[in-house]
Image (cartoon, rainbow, N blue to C red):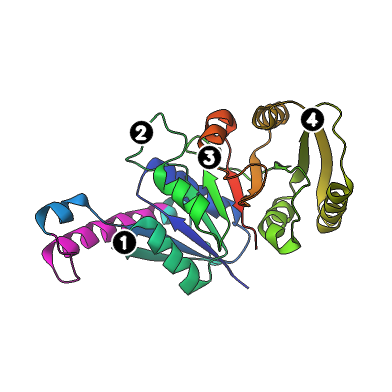
Amino acid sequence: MKKKILLPTDFSKYAWNAINYAIELFKDEPCDFYILNTFRESGYVLESMMVPEPGERLYELAKEEADKGLEKVFQQIMVTKGQNIDHKFIMNSKFNFLKEAVEQLVERNDIDLIIMGTKGVTDATRTIYGSNTVDIMEQIRSCPVIAVPADAKVELPKEIVFPTNYKIFIKKKELTSLIDIVKKTNASLKILHVVDGEEKLNDKQLDNKHLLEEYFEDVDYTFHTLDHSDTHSAITCFVDSRDANMIAFINKKHSFFGSILSKPLVKKLGYHSKIPVLVLRDK
C-alpha cells in the first residue's frame, strides 16, 4: 500500500528542505506526496469584510499566484530529484488557514505522515519554530509530524533518540511511524531515560519498559540512562554527544514533557534547530 505524505509549503527555503527530506526518506517506497499551499491574505479583510469566493478578483489572483508557486515546486522536484515512477505528486492550493486545510486533507485522504519545515518565510529569524509549525505539531492529533529545520542535512537518519520516563503506557500503534522509519533506514534507536540521583524504576515503569522491549524486538535498539537534574538539558547533551540525527516524542497531554513545544522546552532544546523532530500521536 502506498504511503500518503502531506508536505505543506509556503515556498520558503524551510519548506523546500522539508520536501527534499521527505523524498529522500521515502526514496525506495511508493508514495503519494500531497503538496499543500494555503493562501489567505490580510488584504482581503482590509478591502472587504466579505470572504472572497471563487470567481472574485482577489480570490482568483491569490489562487493564480499559489498555483504558479506549486508548479515551480513541481518543476524543481523533477529537475533535482528526477522522476521516480513510484512517486506521485498531488498539488493542492487552498484558500484557508494552514491548520484547517491540513486537518481537511489529512481526514479526506487518510494521510500517514506530515513533513514540514520548522518555520516559514514570514517567521522571525530568531525563532526556532514558526507559529504554523507549532500549531500543526501540537494540534493535529490524527497524524504524526516530522519538523525539518532549514539547516538539517537531507540524509537518512542513522541514530534516533526516543526519550521516555516509562511512566506513561504506550500502545504499539502509537509507535508505528517510528518503527517504520527505523526499519526503512536501518537506524539505531536509542531509548533514553533521564533520572535525578538514585531514582529507581517502580513496578509500573518496569512493565512499560518491558512493553517497549516487545514493541522494538525487530529493530536495533538500546536502553540508556542519564543522571541529570534537568531533563531537557540532559536530552540535549545526549543528542549532541552521539551525533544523533533525529529525535522522536509521543506528544501526550499528560506526559512529563507536557506539550512538546512548550516555551521552556523550545528554549532549552537547542538541537531543534539542527535535526528533524518526529512527533508521534497518542491514540
Judge by depth and name the residue closer to the eye, 249 or 230.
Answer: 230
x and y, in percent, of residue 247 in the image: 65, 42
Left or right: residue 156 versus residue 119 is right
Residue identified by numbered label 1: 96
Left or right: residue 216 versus residue 234 is right
Left or right: residue 254 versus residue 133 is right
199 to 87, vertically: above or below: above
Q: CA distance from mark 2 to mark 4?
A: 34 Å
Type of amino acid under label 3: Ser
Q: Which mark is residue 124?
A: 2
Few, some or many residues within 10 Å of mark 1 (<14, 14–19, 20+)? some
Type of amino acid under label 2: Ala
**Which residue is depicted at the point 85% across and 33% down?**
199
Few, some or many residues within 10 Å of mark 3 (<14, 14–19, 20+)? few
3 to 237, vertically: above or below: below
Q: Which residues are magenta?
A: 49-76
Judge by depth and name the residue closer to the eye, 6 or 141.
Answer: 141
Q: Is residue 119 visible?
A: yes
Q: Nearer the viewer, mark 3 or mark 1?
A: 3
Please tell me which of labels 4 and 1 falls first in the chain: 1
Please tell me which of labels 2 and 3 falls first in the chain: 2
Instruction: Say which quadrant the C terminus sits in.
Output: bottom right
Q: CA distance from mark 3 to mark 1?
A: 26 Å
Q: Which mark is residue 236?
A: none
User: Is residue 81 magenta-colored?
Assistant: no
User: Is residue 60 magenta-colored?
Assistant: yes
